[in-house]
Amino acid sequence: MTDSPQDDLILAASSPQAIGALTDDGPVAPPTSRGRDIWSQFRKHKGAMLGLGFLSFITLAVLVGPYIYTVDPQKLDIRAKDFRPIYTALWDSSAKVGWNKPLGSDQLGRDNLAQMLAGGRASMAVGWAAMLLSVLIGTAVGVLAGFFKQLDGVLMRLTDLFLALPILPLLLLAVTLFRQPLRAGFGPEGGMFILIVSIVAITSWMPTARIVRGDVLAIKEREFVLAARSIGSTPGKLIRRHILPNVLSPILVSAALGLATAIITESALSFLGVGFPSDFPTWGKMLADAVQRMERFPERVMLPGIAISLTVLSVNYLGDGLRDALDPRIRGR
Amino acid sequence: MLTYATRRTILAIPTLLFISFVIFMLLQLAPGDPMAQVPLTVPPDVKQKMREALGLGAPPLVQYWKWLVQVFWIEPQVLIDWIFGTSLAEGKLRVISWQTRSPVMDIILQRIPQTLWVVGVAYVVAILIALPIGVYSAYRQYSVFDQAGTFVTMIGFSIPPFFTGPLLIVIFSVISLETWWLPVLPSIYDTTHVVNDWQSFGFQVKQMTMPVMVLAFQITAQLSRYMRASMLDNLGQDYVRTARAKGLSEAVVVNVHVLRNSMIPVITVIALGIPAIFGGAIITETVFKVNGIGQLLLTALFANDLPMVMTLTFIFAVLIVVFNLIADILYGLLDPRIRYD
Amino acid sequence: MLDDTSTAQPVARIENLRVEFQTKAGTVAGVKDVSFEIGAGETVCVVGESGSGKSVSSLALMRLIEYGGGTIAGGKLLFDSRDRGPLDLADQSQRNMRDIRGNEIGMIFQEPMTALNPVFTVGRQLTEGLRVHRGLSKAEARAEALSLLQQVRIPEPERRLDQYPHELSGGMRQRVVIAMALACKPRLLIADEPTTALDVTIQAEILALIDRLKRETGTAVMFITHDMAVVAQMADRVVVMFRGNKVEEGTAEEIFERPQHPYTKALLAAVPKLGEMSGTDLPSPMKLVGQESRIPAPIPGSTEVLLKVENLTTRFAVKGGLMRRTVANVHAVEDLSFSVNKGQTLSLVGESGCGKSTAGRSLLRLVEPLSGKIDLDGTDVMALSQSGLRNARREMQMIFQDPFASLNPQIQLADQVAEPLSNYGVGSRSERQDRVAMLFDRVELPRSFMQRYPHELSGGQRQRIAIARALALNPKLIVADEAVSALDVSVQAQVVNLMMELQADLGLGYVFISHDMAVVERVSHHVGVMYLGRIVEIGPRRAVFEDPRHPYTQALMKAVPIADPKKRKSEKDLHFKPIPSPIHPVGYEPAPSVYNEVSPGHFVLETDSGY
Amino acid sequence: ERGADGEVKIIYWQAPSILNPFLSGGTKDTESSSLIVEPLARFNEAGDLVPWLVDEIPTVENGGISEDLTQITWKITPGLKWSDGSDFTSEDVKFTYEYCTHPEGGCAQLTKFEPVASVEIPDDLTVVVTFNEPTPYPFTAFVGGESPILQKAQFEQCLGAAASTCTEQNFNPIGTGPFVVDEFKPNDVITLSANPNYRDPAKPAFAKVTFKGGGDAEGAGRAVMQTGEYDYAWNLQLAPDVIAEMEAGGQGKPVAGFGPLMERIMLNNTNPDPALGPDERSVIRPHPFLSDPAVYKAMSMAIDRPLLVEVGYGQAGKVTCSWVPAPEAFAYQNEDCGTQDIEGAKAMLDDAGIVDTDGDGVREKDGVPLSILYQTSTNAVRQDFQALIKDWWEQIGMEVELRNVDGSVFFGGDAGSPDTFQKFYADVEMYANTFNGTDPQAYLGHGLCDTAPRPDTQWQGENISRFCDEEYDALHTELTKTADLAKRQEIGRKLSQIAYERGGLIPLVHRGRLSAHSNTLGGVILNVWDSELWNVADWYRIKE
Ligand SMILES: Nc1ncnc2c1ncn2[C@@H]1O[C@H](COP(=O)(O)OP(=O)(O)OP(=O)(O)O)[C@@H](O)[C@H]1O
Ligand SMILES: Nc1ncnc2c1ncn2[C@@H]1O[C@H](COP(=O)(O)OP(=O)(O)OP(=O)(O)O)[C@@H](O)[C@H]1O
Ligand SMILES: [Mg+2]
Ligand SMILES: [Mg+2]
Ligand code: NI
């Protein structure tokens, strides 16, 4: 009982002759790859496209920006402190602005634009790394638990355990706990980076694991897996070739959401004062530091705040679009 | 169902014990020192004596055992005493906070009302707003309302509370916008405020407005997404067509048939969120100086008040486990297809 | 066919209906141009293959198509309303339609499993319509619902009212849906494939029920199906649809005996009819319209034993209680013994849940049997280690029921067919490619399909890919689990023919699992009838079909509808007991199967089977 | 008139967790309890002693202090009552001594009582404190907000190990002060009302006090100066521009006071080279280059102290180069301190032969590059200082790595952690220190050779720099024997100078305490020598 619209296209070509009636015509449309299908559906989701655009823009900006705008974000220039962004000159001609400080400078004269770029780098790096790690753990646990019955109980109890561990306290605790040894090993920034990334990942993989496990359980019951087993596929191959590609969509979606959570968590940590070292700007830190001077220098709060929110917003939209695009029920329309 | 619940409860006990052990050991390993906040003018040997007075010298396992006994044996007795006026726990050592030298449980009880008021009200407000929004945007999928709703909820997802919080304070407390008919709201939550008449109730509402706004915004965002997704799932089901074929009005089809089914996963999500109410909202509480549980945990953590941190995190763990169980059981109750055993 | 209704005022008349859907690929017409009418007390059967627009027409008539994203682009839907006189439903408001839906037009849907709201009781769902349309009070509605349930002959109707849908069996649920559709005594009853998902025995009962209700109430019935045998059972008049158009219309007799349109002819030729093979010993491929050049030759096979199964038992543990211990077992396959000869087909038939699939999977040890012996051409399959088993699976392959589910949607077809080869490291990459190309030729698929993905193929084509994949390793035995059940008749006929051709050419042995007696009759050398995990009767096909001995076999034969309007069944001679539960507590040991050989090779179970 | 002015609202961004200062030692706890319990004598805003529960301050002249400097006799003002109405007697004073010196009590103010040999009470109003040895400055026990008197009747059951079971007592101490506790919510809020038995019937002017704790300095400052929700905010450690902006809110104003608190950079006199191993580094002397006067002097010269003040503390900071910046008479004055001289610093290094020999931009001394690790605790202002100072030091040809450690670890004193300020596994470290009261004798003892933290003292000890100078030790011994104030002050200045000039530390900023009070709150006199709330009984509401 096919429900494919292609049947109608066939009709145009074949009249109901006896033979024609029973021949099992194939589609006349050229083969479309699944990827293209998904892409064309994805493209229709305006929010997701905007999200993708903005995310690419931000990523590119923080990656390439520091090579174009080569001001050292840590460079103190105490005489040029408290500059306003150049655009304030539009309504306030007396504002202290300068073309050399396009987005102004902070109370020690550090350049805001350079800090935004450097901070974005840190935030994005943390976001991506933590997301990848978390998705990796989540997928591994989910697939193993779903595929191997013997492991299911143990792994799911483990997941419960991590779910029951309250996240923020644990996070704060681990920061105080491992900051020093890691810093010794990888330097102040490297150590903190590893620490934050791993903490965010360790405390956020559980939903992915649960979703993936559920999907694996369902897919395991699909006949093509049984078919693959009957043609002698080894478990490893079964997972790689048959299971993983089919759980890709929940993984991608939780990856998108994971990226958002990671960025927010990092900035929350910075806000609570347990994030990166002080001379290492991240958006969250810039925001937290600037809250004090919010009225006089609203841009110092707004710029990082908007950057965080927009990034997370676009990632969320991206996730939404991905979910729609990957859902065959919606794609079929 | 009963066996299922029993089984889960029994399974939860070793899990919780294990969790408590893990937390305890992590805290033990933490390099902080409860004396770090004592000024430098107090000499080290005095600090050492103070530490010993707190019982810090004992080996970790002994401390852990003591804590277990205090939490599982003595505290329940205190509760019984309190309810029945007996004196079982007379003279027994309770879990004592290092910062305040007073029983941890007493302080927690003191903090719970604030947290429940603020976070709980936010949760209720959020539910009341989120569900209709979710239902309507699913029903009119891709309509303007849906698009706008999606946008707003996405923003709710995306803007961290430590951004919205100070923003609101500046808007409502600092730059007084009275000229625009906006009320001036207190930036510092008064935990001693007693509601006894309309005026004091008004003040309570005022001081709760901002934290509740910030929190409810976030929760609304999440819940309405869930509600929408769940509604969409169910709107495509065959039974909806059956209901329409019976000639039922759209209101009945959507608000009775579809809603009832869609509520099943959403209610469990709501149940799973309840532990977070008790956990307080660390950031929001910090921003608005609501001295609730979240703020308690944060200060205890920074002061290295291990008994307090330990007990609080353990209580959260218990709540999470319990509400997980409740969510599962609710699922079973709401969905007649699911029968545990 | 008895009453001449064409002169009477029709209850509903569809004129030049056209329904369109907005899709990604532009506007698609689900129904292009369909006109027919339904008179009171008349059953009009709408037949056609999947996607021909049957459901769309019926939903358009209910004006439910708007909720599925369709629009009525043209045509009239004239309906003779009880209260308002003749109306064109196509331009009624949804408000008015609400008064008509469920009140004057009732509808029965295909899937009894999903058509009922899982969280409300049967009673509540039944009374809803009554209270809306007839303004009954709660108690009145309940009484009315009860009488409706009695009318559709559900056992213990009082109890059912307070049960939830999932607590009822498929047949009972379908009765509830029918009761719901009939609640307000509609003038027109639309039944959209009401029995497709059901077992033959239950199907027979439901068909009889609808027929009886129609006669008792004089309702007009629009009956949608793709099963010609069902049409033959039910129809007064038949409308044949093909790709959105009506191609032929006539009384049942006209259609079956003097089909005019080539499509109808082809369709009828492709329908296997029970009893067609009477008098022959060997199966032979069907004669299809358009393939007259191929002369179907009987397939003899050999007498050499390929697979010998003895006392095969498979159980699934049911866990429960505080400690999650095994508290009971599902006795899915119980003491099964049979053998398959090289180049021959053994069919296993039986109702849903009788253990056919489990038996098939146990053969390959895709589920672990509890005990028994499986001997495949000299290898003791039960004794093999995991790696040995992997090797043994080269010799036996499976084809599954659902062509949509049994192919991985993410992998190109050529790779899917090549996968068994690469799994066993057969040949080099280019050799494998050649072999895949050859296999495509073998199953008559163009090589240009090799780079496609499963979703770009039709069901029949997919099933051919599955067959090609099963053939890749040159197996001796293929277990075909409902391999053609999900396909349209015409496609089914082609696939059946292909399988038989391959058998003749390659000397394959088949274990053919199916619930469709007519197909089984067509393909098998031997037939085993299963009931509750056991084979109740096994023997040469001819013996079993022409001389069924076990009471269950006899009942089953009686229930099968025959694609011939002259051989209608009546409700009287249908009495089926629901299948008892195969779940038994731990420690329960059923008696061994003892067979009585009634004729050479024809065995009938002596042991109590539960029937 | 008592209670006439209604309610006063005080906010401390650190929340008090207990009202018994003997069990906490935290400033927030000491200050909040000073509303309730009082010492025999207090310091006023100038650092001078004023009698509080006694009639006069004992001196050698008035016979209150024995000639041999081993005994001090306090005469309690007659007629004093506890807030519960019972009499305040010398029994209570003696009990307080016993309470704090109990070996299992973990009393935070133990140092104040350690030199005391015994406390005798010949009668209800006389307390005779005998010291172990001649004590030229005997005003530690029972003096100042940190050593108030507890009521014997209330705390009798709370000696030693029982101290922590006395929650009721610790939360609701009975005192002689202007207010009594109505309700104490630990780490949150205290509500108090006027003490009906307060000695001055006209005071306090306020009937109620709400003492809110928690949040951050910024919120507290905002609540007083911008929104006017609170009347008094304590210790606003905020950047000067932030304070200025808040002040513009017009509801309140900041007040600053200067105690001996001083932000400094400690120079490591031992070699912190990690290669030496954990038990040797920071023990073995000397430091490869920091021991060279040219190096540390150049480092000090390179610093622009006025800028540091401006960036970090504004009106709550002053330039200083004295180890003891206050009281004024103890402070060593140095004129050059306030001017930065990068060129001079370079020249000084060049003259000492410390030049860049390998062209990497970093000077070497005897082949060892001037590359230092500069650590401090995590704190916004300190990090700004680090950034600025790093910049200056790099200008004179040094290489600087920055590091900041969480305060609870840095000041935590955990012997197992390598990151405490005592271990000093770095070349220089920055923090602030101070002392209580007005006498710096014990504080100056932090420069004695044998007080250096070492493995065999479990890394305890106050000489963080491991500074060791014979002349300094001798001079300090002299100080302990001198009773004449002028002479003491002179020795004190000399000690400060030695420590500065011989490489003990680089003083940076003399830090004041900046608090804020609303424009309608009168009577506030900021006092950094005692509790800020020392004169809360005199506070009143300014009528419009
Ligand atoms: N919601 C829809 N959107 C787009 N096309 C649709 C939709 N519903 C049906 N169609 C198309 O309309 C045509 C007729 O579908 P219909 O469901 O009526 O077939 P059918 O004859 O009932 O088939 P089956 O036997 O599988 O039920 C098909 O080509 C189908 O693809
Ligand atoms: N994995 C399993 N675990 C538990 N019980 C099972 C499992 N698989 C099948 N069963 C049970 O075993 C019995 C036989 O199932 P099986 O699938 O073999 O029936 P079938 O004859 O193939 O039915 P159908 O015609 O519906 O495919 C059923 O009662 C089924 O519920
Ligand atoms: Mg259909
Ligand atoms: Mg089956
Ligand atoms: Ni000291």
Image: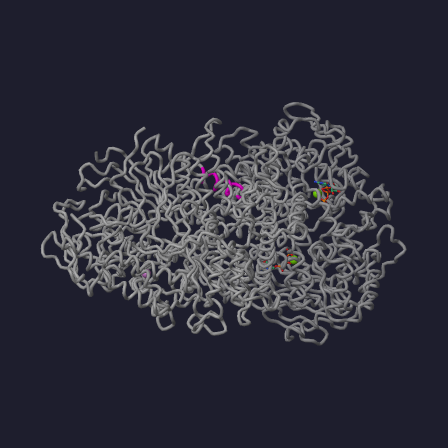
Viewer-side residue, D225 vs C210: D225
**Residue D267 visible in the shown view:** yes
Give x and y (percent) for residue B308.
36, 56
Residue B221: in magenta span: yes
Count numbered badges in the picture: 0
Query: Is residue C206 shown above or below B186?
Result: below
Residue most toward the front?
A: D351
* Quarter of the N terminus of chain C within the rendering: top right
Query: Is residue A9 shown above or below C102?
Result: below
> Which residue lies at the image location 20% right of the left edge and 64% below the top edge?
D134
Which residues are the magenta region? Answer: B210-222
Q: How is the image coloured?
A: one colour
Viewer-side residue, C435 vs A331: A331
Query: Is residue C241 shown above or below C197?
Result: above
Give x and y (percent) for residue C602.
70, 66
* Quarter of the C terminus of chain C within the rendering: bottom right
Residue B52: in magenta span: no
Give x and y (percent) for residue C111.
64, 45
Query: Is residue B188 shown above or below B90?
Result: above
Residue most toward the top?
A: C84
Is residue C156 found left or right of C309 in the rendered image? left
Viewer-side residue, A109 vs D2: A109
> Which residue lies at the image location 27% right of the left edge and 65% below the top edge?
D478
Residue most toward the left?
A: D123
Ligand 1: image quarter: top right
Give x and y (percent) for residue B255.
54, 36
Viewer-side residue, B97 vs C551: B97
Could you say which quadrant of the image residue A98 lies in? top right
**Residue C174 visible in the shown view:** no
Dominant secondary structure of the magenta stretch?
helix
